[in-house]
Structures are given as structure tokens and as C-alpha cells.
Image (cartoon, helix red, strand yellow):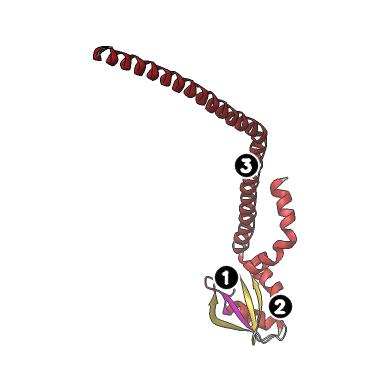
Amino acid sequence: MSLADIKAKIRSDSQAQIQAIESENDAKIREITQKVNGEVKAVQDSYARRLAKEEPEVLKRREIVAELDAKRVDLGTRQRLIGEAFDAALKKMTELSPDKYVAFAEKLMKEAISTGHETVLVGKNEKTLDQRWLDGYNASHQTSLTLSPEKLPISGGFVLRDDRIDTNCSWEMLIADARPEIESEVVKRLFS
């Protein structure tokens, strides 16, 4: 055998081995690809089943959260409206005519006085309950109330002070005191 024949045979054998290796690799690649595709399909199927199972629960949770959000917004709106209703009542009290204002304040004063020697504190912008009014009240009710130079941040009414005891008859306190008793009625009227 000549050198050329030996080289040709080596080439031929090498080529046959390369083809055999390539065929074997192709078969392994197909086998691995099939296995991977099977695993991918199994994972996809698993996720699809899980999604199908959990989707209604997720939607239900979203619906519950949406309902809670809507109720929270509704409650906030209702609370704001109730607050506005009581603010309107306070405004209405501050806009009483002077005669009604004085009559109401005198009725409160009669109930609040304990000694007849208390000090009367009024709001910063008080125009009706002044020294002249208090002098008239003292004369007609045999009391000796004094008007304090101290002014309070109240919108109407007064605070009666006897030593260290204050009796708050301000419009704000009257509304705050009445609110728990009448709030359910206000709610019925606003939202029925």
C-alpha cells in the first residue's frame, strides 16, 4: 500500500468516524430536545393547571379588595357629609338672631350657674354677650357674674368659670355633646 493509499484510507476512516460521531450527537441532541420539550410541556401544563385552579380565587380576592375600597370610600364620604351636617348646625347657631341668641344663652346660663358668682368667658368675636347684656342678666336674676377680659376661640355661647371648674356652654361643646345622641338620626335623614 502506498502512502497515498494509506492517507486516503485514514481520511476515509476519519470521515466515517466523524459521520458516526455526528449521527450519534444528532441522536443525543434529538433525545435531549425531546426530554427538555417534555419537561417544558410538563411545567407549562402544571402552571396552566395551577392558574386555572387559582384564577377564580385571585379574581375573588380582587373583587373583595375592590368592595372594601368602595366601602371605605363610601364610609369616608358619609363621615364627611355627617361632619358637614354638624358644621352647618354650628353655623346656624352662630347666625341666630340676637333675640334668639340671648334667650338661648340665658336659658343655658340658668342651668349652668351654681353659685351666682362665676366668671363668664366668651368668644373672641362675640358681639351679643357683652358687659351690658351681663349687667342686665345679673339685675334680673340676682346674680353677680363677671365678664372675663380673656376671650376664647369659640364661635358662640360661653364658658362659666368657678375657681378651677369650667362649665363649657359654647356652641361647639353643645354640638359635640349632642352629636352621639342625634348622629343616628342624622345618618337616617342623610342616607335613607
The residues bearing labels 3 and 2 have C-alpha atoms spaced at a distance of 51 Å
Q: Nearer the viewer, mark 3 or mark 2?
A: 3
Which label number is shown at residue 154? Answer: 1
Relative image position of residue 96 (x, y in whole percent): 62, 62
3 and 142: which is toward the camera? 3
Amino acid type at image mark 2: Ala
Residue drawn at x 64%, y 58% as measured from the top left: 86
The residues bearing labels 3 and 1 have C-alpha atoms spaced at a distance of 42 Å
Q: Is residue 188 above or below residue 41?
A: below
124 and 98: which is toward the camera? 124
Locate the C terminus by quadrant.
top right
Q: Which residues are magenta?
A: 119-131
Relative image position of residue 67 (x, y in whole percent): 65, 42
Q: Which residue is disc 2 drawn over?
A: 112
Amino acid type at image mark 3: Ala
Which quadrant of the figure has residue 84? bottom right
Does the magenta-highlighted stretch encompass residue 122? yes
Q: Which residue is disc 3 drawn over?
A: 66
Q: Earlier in the sequence, mark 3 or mark 2?
A: 3
Amino acid type at image mark 1: Ile
Q: Is residue 82 above or below residue 42?
A: below
Q: For mark 2, give the secondary structure.
A: helix
Relative image position of residue 132 (x, y in whole percent): 58, 79
Is 182 situated left or right of 158 in this image? Answer: right
Does the magenta-highlighted stretch encompass residue 39? no
Is 171 situated left or right of 181 in this image? Answer: left
Which label number is shown at residue 57? Answer: none
